[in-house]
Amino acid sequence: MDETTSALRIELPRTSNLNDIIGTRLREAPDAVLAEVPRGGRWAPVTVREFDAQVVAVAKGLVAHGVEPGDAVGIMSRTRYEWTLLDFAAWAAGAVPVPIYETSSAEQVQWILTDAAVSVVVAETAANAATVAEVRDQAPALREVLVIDDGAVEALTAAGAQVPDDEIARRRGLATLDDLATIIYTSGTTGRPKGAELTHRNFASLTANTVPEVPEVFADAGGRTLLFLPLAHVFARFIEVLAISSGTVLGHSPDIKNLVDDLGAFHPTYVLAVPRVFEKVYNAAEQSAASGGKLRIFHWAAATAIAYSRSLDTPRGPSPWLRAQHTVSDALVYGKLRAKLGGRARYAVSGGGPLGERLGHFYRGIGLTILEGYGLTESTAPTCVNRPERTKIGTVGAQLPGCAARVAPDGEILLRGHHIFRGYHNNPQATAEAFDGEWFRTGDLGSLDEDGYLRITGRKKEIIVTAGGKNVAPAVLEDRIRAHALVSQCVVVGDNKPFIGALITIDPEGLPGWLTMHGKPELTVAQAMTDPDVLSALDLAVTRANAAVSKAESIRKFTVLPGDFTVENGYLTPSLKVKRALVLKDFADDVERIYAPTADRASLHTA
């Protein structure tokens, strides 16, 4: 199969827009809880009626500050309740909210402010505002910067007190489905970010069709989800809109350091995360079991979970003996793991990269079904997702209603549908290059099976061609190596080289637990780089990853780098993707040492 399309369930009126989501909720259940916010050590409810009143008040403030319909309003903040409030307030004012990552450099901020002609920025902290101030004289459209921590919401509310309700009602009805809703700048692993123009149709229609398609998750009467991924990224932004549309109670967790506590207090019924989060939860649980002298029990329970999940895909299902083992494992291990995610989560949505079959089966086996999906900024996040009762672990699922996918002769995945963006802002050339007729070129490689389920095999631009002419997709190896507790990042290399190699960084968070688990004394990352046991473990991780590919595609040597790749040092995008081109440029000498005739101790032969 090389093409599949899923028909629309719901066709929205062309005159509708994202403001109608609040209007519908207000008519149907004004006193229902829309969100919960941390207040006085507890999660305090915010009803639909209260949220709408706050949205209108802040929208009036934006109007009072000179924001006109169609103006761009920048939001530079971590994921918190005020982000969502400002998002819907901007739409209520007829404006176009433009996300800016709070980790962005002054140069990145300057580019977004000028390219999108942002008129007002609402920043989270004084430090964020200071970054904007560095480039303010280079952003001619920018008139004002407000700071959330300094009372921006209250100031906007006060400023808009004299703006009539009728003005907001008028502005809420201006946009149609085809009008611009937001510009999201791709975090981009290379070059200057491109601003993807997403319309009201992209969000509203995709949301309206996704909720009834996956009712077990998104239409659950008691549904709750805690956002902790950046709302500046399309994945969390789509779930924000979907949650408010579907009736899911929405919470926000701005600091990843408090995530476990926030999950435990909020009790979400579903969570969304990138694969790295699920990897870290597994590794932390394994290390905790080791420090408590229960490593053998954990490994037995993990193997049981994987076997149990795999048996669910067979005609006969789990045997009575496997069911008995699973029950015991649940009492000893699984319940504690589910508790780390709040205790009530039955489903998780994973995107932003491949999860891997091992982890997919492990989590389903412990009672948390991870629905792996696929999408891009340009597709308003999801194009495909696995369904609770129709999950194929190892794939990213079948297309959502109104979404189409095909695989080009060269293996590239092409997309079409109501969720595809209308183009790159101020960049007609990039827009033209992004489309093959009416099909959007994703740059990803994959295949469709007989049921229309999509499998991702790599990135077209990242394909490595060795000196021997072998084409190698690095993602297959990188994902498996990165799943190891010691590994933070892995970049496979070998373009125009005689064999495949890899650059590996040690996870400073995972190292202490791994050392304890193996009865070793404390080591710094620098010490671990030359420790024989650490290197042996990494060698084994590489060997296991090589088992998934042919001999010609396998890693023969790797080197451990002295530092890690982070958002802060510029080697990761805010959505935690490695900036491959920058890594290869800055670590060119390390790559060359892998291929030197006599490798030093930093480069190791692998099986």
Image: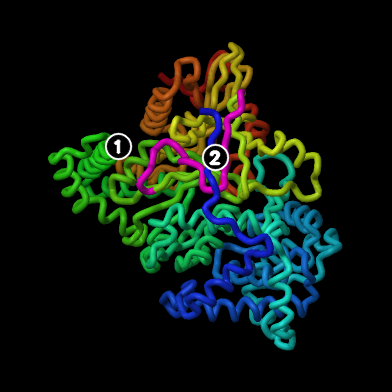
Check the image and report above or below for 351 versus 591.
below
Camera-side residue of 4 and 136: 4
Q: Secondary structure at mark 2?
A: strand
Task: Point out residue 521 in the picture as x, y percentages from the top left corner.
Answer: 34, 43
Camera-side residue of 169 and 190: 169
Task: Point out residue 61 in the picture as x, y percentages from the top left corner.
Answer: 71, 79
The earlier-in-sequence mark between 2 and 1 is: 2
Q: CA distance from mark 2 to mark 1?
A: 25 Å
Q: Tell me the quarter of the image containing the C terminus.
A: top left
Check the image and report above or below for 230 versus 501.
below
Q: Is residue 140 left or right of residue 414?
A: right
**Amino acid type at mark 2:** Thr
Q: Residue at x 66, y 59 (%)?
A: 200
Residue beneath label 2, please?
5
Residue beneath label 1, please?
313
Task: Point out residue 189 in the picture as x, y percentages from the top left corner.
Answer: 65, 40
Q: Residue at x 37, y 67 (%)?
A: 222
User: Can residue 539 be seen in the rendering of this structure?
Assistant: yes
Camera-side residue of 225 and 543: 225
Camera-side residue of 516 and 463: 463
Task: Point out residue 229 in the picture as x, y percentages from the top left corner.
Answer: 52, 56
Q: Which residues are magenta?
A: 388-409
Query: Could you tell me what secondary structure mostly forms the magenta stretch?
Result: loop
Check the image and report above or below for 325 versus 145.
above
